[in-house]
Image (tube, grey):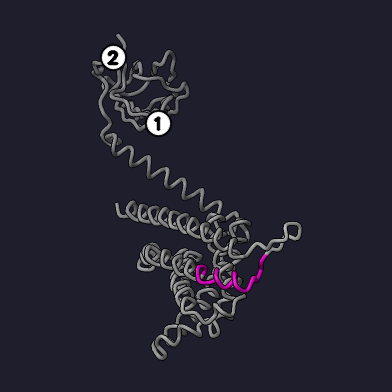
Amino acid sequence: MSLTPQVFWAQRHHELYLRVELSDVQSPEIHISDNTLHFKALGHGAKGVNTYEFSLEFLEPVKQEVQQRSTQRQVGITVKKCESNWWLRLTKQERKPLFLSPDFDRWLDESDAEKELHDKEQRITKIRTESRTREDPFLYVKRGYLFMYNLVQFLGFSWIFVNMTVRLFILGKDSFYDTFHTMADMMYFCQTLAVLEIINPLIGLVKTGVFPSVIQVVGRNVILFIVLGQLEEMQNKGVVFFVFYLWSTIEIIRYPFYMLACIDMEWKLLTWIRYTIWIPLYPLGGLAEAASIVQAIPVFNETERFSLRVPLLNVAISFSIFLIIYLVFLVAGLVINCRHMNKQRRRRLGRRKRKMH
């Protein structure tokens, strides 16, 4: 009658662990056939130095390869599962063999195993991300460029915001009507530079979507360079104050957030403001832009500026028609940008909740 050693077992979703209580084992015979593990070895066990053997038919299919590691005290065996899942028991037979016991040193319940698997995947992902980051020789050049770009934009819009605020306190409503003449040069500079926000994702410097950037940059530049910049009649209107003030308020929050991201830093208060303040400011900014277009349409009709003449039909197509079409796209763009911001907000808040847990 053959002797059977004491065997302890544990599992993870993707593999099985067996620990055979035999010491001083030399070259054990271990193989899998017909989904059954066969073990035979000469070693020191409960019955002294003898030949010990056992067979275990697994509950579900396993791979043929067996990893084993023998020490002076025991033999460790690792078997890979064909499918990553949690087994209710180790063997196909419902009655557990007498020589088989749980390995409480390695034992986990299913929820603990899932957490361990999740943590392992996160570590692997982090290592891969860091390795990809290290492989980029221009990483710090790119980060430096993005940091400086966001810094310049922050300083520019801060200058506009502070000056408009000070003028509002000193002059009151009178400051509304000369906003364009006092702030236009800096706004021209900032919005011209903002074209880089379309180029940066196109060449892969940032991973944000191109389309939302195109909507915002092109939309603002149409308002600034055409509706306000080309019509002197619009430059003295109070709506210019609200357009410029809302733009600058949004940007003095957005650009510092991006600056910190360039150096892998996060200020929780700024992050919260960044993903919250847009809820009132974006619709208000869109409303101010729409109001400027509505006020500009009669001016374009009267002056016929930028009208497109069709000689064959002897008619002129007023530029106001294009502004009406643009007004529709402005509303659509506002909806798209709000959805984009809301998606980023949910992702950011979800990431924070996972960190807390």
Specify the quadrant of the image occupied by residue 73: top left
Element at badge 2?
loop
Q: Amino acid at mark 2?
A: Gln
Specify the quadrant of the image occupied by residue 107: top left
Residue at point 35% right, 41% down? 116
Instruction: Determine contact: label 1, label 2, CB under 8 Å.
Output: no
| Prevailing secondary structure class for the magenta stretch in the rendered image | helix
In the rendered image, residue 147, in percent from the top left (x then y), is placed at 54, 69
Is residue 17 in sight in this rendering? yes
Q: Amino acid at mark 1?
A: His
Of all residues, the one furthest to the right in this rendering is 312
Is residue 305 on the magenta stretch?
yes
Q: From the viewer's side, name the closer residue of 266 and 214.
A: 214
In the rendered image, residue 196, in percent from the top left (x then y), is placed at 61, 65
Q: From the viewer's side, name the closer residue of 247 and 196.
A: 247
CA–CA distance in space, label 1 to label 2: 21 Å
Per the rendered image, the range of residues in magenta is 293-307
Q: Which residue is mark 1?
A: 14
N-terminal-most mark, 1 or 2: 1
Q: Which residue is mark 2?
A: 93
